[in-house]
């Protein structure tokens, strides 16, 4: 398999120093007593927001603890669009707007006060094959920039190669499609999928996709979920198996905790989510690799699919390591993404504790605060501090369509996380599970399409 070239543009190590003279300026709130933040903008990508720590004036060296503020992912087509000259600029630029005050808006009016603007020119030629640092250090900003009394802003901007394998389902996951690998204009089949739906009280799959010797051990299902009959409304028994072109099963996603409507409602609640187990073959059986929980978030603009994905170290039945937790709009859809190390805000409204999905163009992405048991930082931002540091930077992303829309997920996986076909297939199975979770978490008063229903259930 040949990967597609991508570039990872990172902005980190932000800090601000303001001279004493600026403290007497009535028009500016001094950062030492007021929070600071910035908006980071790149043409054709959603803007990202990050907090800026205040550094005491006497500090001469940047602190050893360094942070990643924002990340942009650029494909070859993104680079070409950025390189197009316009009457306003001859080369692409990264723009950073620095504000004092708290981030956010009330009644459409932002509460922050603009302190300064920073523009960093980007020459992206050659960055698909080698790392390039565009800026690293302090820069004078604001009024009187360049003078001793000016404010100082520290940042690091760099681009590095981040090649990825790109896969796409040729149809909706519940229709048992092929999965093709995309490289430029070439689309080559690499996997086939088989969706199965087990009837209530039936222990045999409708699908014949799994040989008897590779069936899922009941011990795993008991450890990670429950298949007991539950009263009321529920969706269960779904699984999707990924095969290589020889027909051998290489990954599977299976519901282990039914998606059940909360009492008195038609909604799968966060307090009682359904869950999938992502499995890989090993020793003539299936072994757990990851667990995905999903539920229906409540309320207005935030109504959508909530999810949480955790890695299961060495197939153990103990606590997993949370790699992603966020929300995808049930109406617009979005991206499920695992990227570890950023602390910026999500451009699409979700909060991913490792990284949230990007916007609709497949490039920019933001993230929320990392959970306590997941890594913080990337590259020179502290990867080595985490025991499972093999999972770092961009790991994978998958597109997810909103409810009622035809969904053919596109999956991107970092080359550094694929050493065999089973690795790639695991991420493909995970992307199928998050896509099918959009249907599993639909309100129970809505009709389901026939491929997803047991006999006797309401269908579309």
Image (spheres, grey):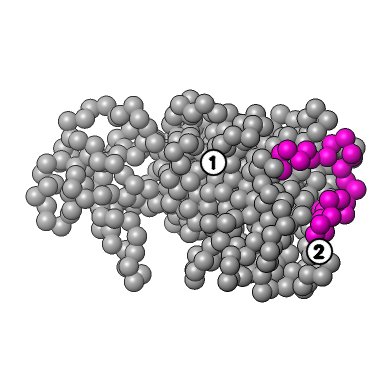
SS state under label 1: strand
Residue 201 colored in magenta in the image: yes
Q: Which residues are magenta?
A: 195-221
* Residue lying at 53% horizontally and 57% vertically, measured from the top left: 271
Q: Residue at x 68, y 66 (%)?
A: 233
Picture quadrant of residue 213: top right
Give left or right: position of 22 versus 329. Answer: left
Relative image position of residue 431 (x, y in whole percent):
68, 49
Mark 2: give few (<14), some (14-19) or many (20+) Cα within 10 Å: some
Residue 76 magenta: no
1 vs 2, front mark: 2
Which one is nearer the viewer's eye here, 202 or 167? 202
Gap in Å between the C-alphas at discs 1 and 2? 32 Å
**Which corner quadrant holds the C terminus?**
bottom right
* Residue 228 on image: x %, y %: 71, 53
Where does the image place residue 125, in percent across and percent down from the top left?
56, 37
N-term-proximal mark, 1 vs 2 = 1
**Residue at 25% across, 58% down:** 113
Q: Quadrant of residue 421?
A: top right
Quarter of the picture containing the N terminus is top right
Residue corresponding to mark 2 = 454
Helix, strand or loop at mark 2: loop
Mark 1 — residue? 322
**Local crowd size for mark 1, using a 10 Å CA cut-off: few (<14), some (14–19), many (≥20):** many
Left or right of 175, for residue 360? left
Q: Nearer the viewer, residue 251 or 219?
A: 219
Rendering coords of residue 83 (x, y %): 55, 48
- What residue is rendered at 77% in x and 51% in y? 239
> Secondary structure of the magenta portion, mostly?
loop
Can residue 183 be spotted in the picture?
Answer: no
**Residue 316 seen by the camera:** yes
């Amino acid at each position: 398999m040949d990967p597609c070239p991508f570039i990872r543009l990172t902005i980190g190590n932000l800090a601000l120093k303001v001279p004493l003279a600026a403290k007497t300026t009535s028009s500016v709130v001094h950062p030492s007593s007021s929070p600071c933040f910035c908006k980071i903008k790149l043409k054709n990508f959603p803007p990202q927001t990050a907090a800026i720590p205040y550094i005491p004036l006497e500090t001469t060296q940047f602190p050893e603890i360094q942070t990643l503020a924002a990340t942009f992912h650029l494909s070859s087509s993104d680079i070409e669009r950025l390189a197009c000259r316009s009457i306003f600029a001859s080369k692409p630029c990264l723009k950073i707007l620095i504000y004092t005050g708290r981030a956010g808006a009330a009644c459409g009016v932002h509460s922050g006060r603009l302190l300064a603007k920073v523009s960093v020119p980007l020459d992206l030629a050659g960055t698909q094959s080698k790392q390039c640092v565009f800026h690293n250090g302090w820069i004078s900003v604001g009024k009187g920039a360049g003078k001793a009394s000016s404010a100082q802003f520290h940042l690091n901007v760099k681009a590095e190669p981040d090649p990825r394998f790109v896969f796409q389902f040729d149809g909706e996951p519940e229709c048992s499609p092929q999965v093709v690998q995309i490289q430029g204009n070439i689309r080559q089949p690499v996997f086939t999928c088989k969706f199965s739906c087990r009837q209530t009280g039936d222990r045999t799959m409708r699908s014949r996709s799994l040989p008897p010797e590779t069936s899922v051990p009941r011990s795993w299902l008991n450890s990670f979920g429950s298949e007991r009959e539950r009263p009321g409304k529920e969706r269960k028994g779904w699984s999707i198996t990924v095969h290589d072109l020889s027909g051998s099963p290489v990954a599977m996603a299976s519901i282990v905790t039914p998606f059940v409507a909360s009492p008195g409602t038609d909604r799968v609640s966060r307090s009682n989510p359904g869950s999938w187990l992502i499995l890989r073959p090993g020793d003539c059986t299936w072994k757990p690799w990851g667990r995905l929980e999903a539920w229906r978030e409540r309320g207005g603009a935030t109504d959508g699919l909530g999810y949480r994905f955790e890695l299961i170290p060495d197939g153990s039945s103990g606590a997993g390591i949370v790699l992603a937790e966020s929300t995808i709009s049930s109406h617009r859809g979005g991206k499920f993404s695992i990227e570890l190390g950023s602390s910026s805000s999500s451009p699409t409204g979700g909060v991913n504790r490792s990284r949230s999905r990007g916007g609709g163009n497949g490039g920019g992405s933001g993230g929320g605060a990392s959970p306590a048991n997941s890594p913080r930082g990337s590259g020179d931002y502290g990867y080595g501090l985490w025991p499972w540091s093999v999972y770092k930077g961009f790991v994978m992303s998958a597109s997810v369509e909103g409810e009622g829309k035809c969904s053919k997920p596109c999956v991107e996986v970092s080359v550094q996380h694929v050493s065999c076909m089973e690795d790639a297939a695991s991420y493909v199975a995970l992307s199928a599970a998050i896509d099918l979770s959009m249907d599993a978490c639909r309100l129970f008063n809505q009709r389901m399409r026939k491929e997803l229903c047991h006999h006797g259930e309401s269908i579309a």
